[in-house]
Image (cartoon, grey):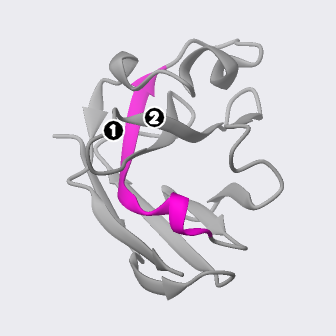
Amino acid sequence: EVQLVESGGGLVQAGGSLRLSCAASGLILEDYAIAWFRQAPGKEREGVSCFYRSDGSIYHADSVQGRFFISSDHAKPTVYLQMNSLKPDDTGVYYCAAKAAPRPAVNFCSLYGPYPGHSDFWGQGIQVTVSS
């Protein structure tokens, strides 16, 4: 059974930082791209970041480029989202998701990262609130 468990959310002031973690079980990161999506109240779910270990591809939405950084822990199946210079517009529920990806692949995250509907598995979501 695949499980994705998010942690690290919370309340932070504008300009602050948070690091989200997505602990995966039941899959290996070499076979799945891991992405972060977020949903603000009244808005559609949107792509934030993506990482696929097998081709090294990384995707970041324009709105978070240069502020958010995605990485993985090679010792365990965990993907991190480091979020810096947070803004009130970053507020929302953040979801970790996984999609089966081919090997070999080239820049797979550019195809998956922006599109939450392509996901195979989802975490339960975690709240991030940025106060002004």
What crowding class fits label 1: few (fewer than 14 Cα within 10 Å), some (14-19), or many (20 or more)? few
Residue at the spot x=40%, y=70% of the render? Answer: 128
In front: label 2 or label 1:
1
From the viewer's side, name the closer residue of 23 and 126: 126
From the viewer's side, name the closer residue of 121 and 39: 39
Q: Are marks 2 and 1 in contact (CB under 8 Å)?
A: yes
Using residue 116 as the reference point, say whether residue 50 is left or right of it. right
**Numbered tag placed on residue 11 in the rendering:** none
**Numbered tag placed on residue 43 in the rendering:** 1
Query: Label 2 belongs to which residue?
Result: 46
Q: Which residues are magenta?
A: 87-100
Q: Position of residue 44 (x, y in %)?
A: 34, 32
From the viewer's side, name the closer residue of 11 and 72: 11
Up the image or down, 72 lies above or below 14; here it is above
Q: Amino acid at mark 2?
A: Glu
SS at circle 2: strand
Q: Quadrant of the C terminus?
A: bottom right
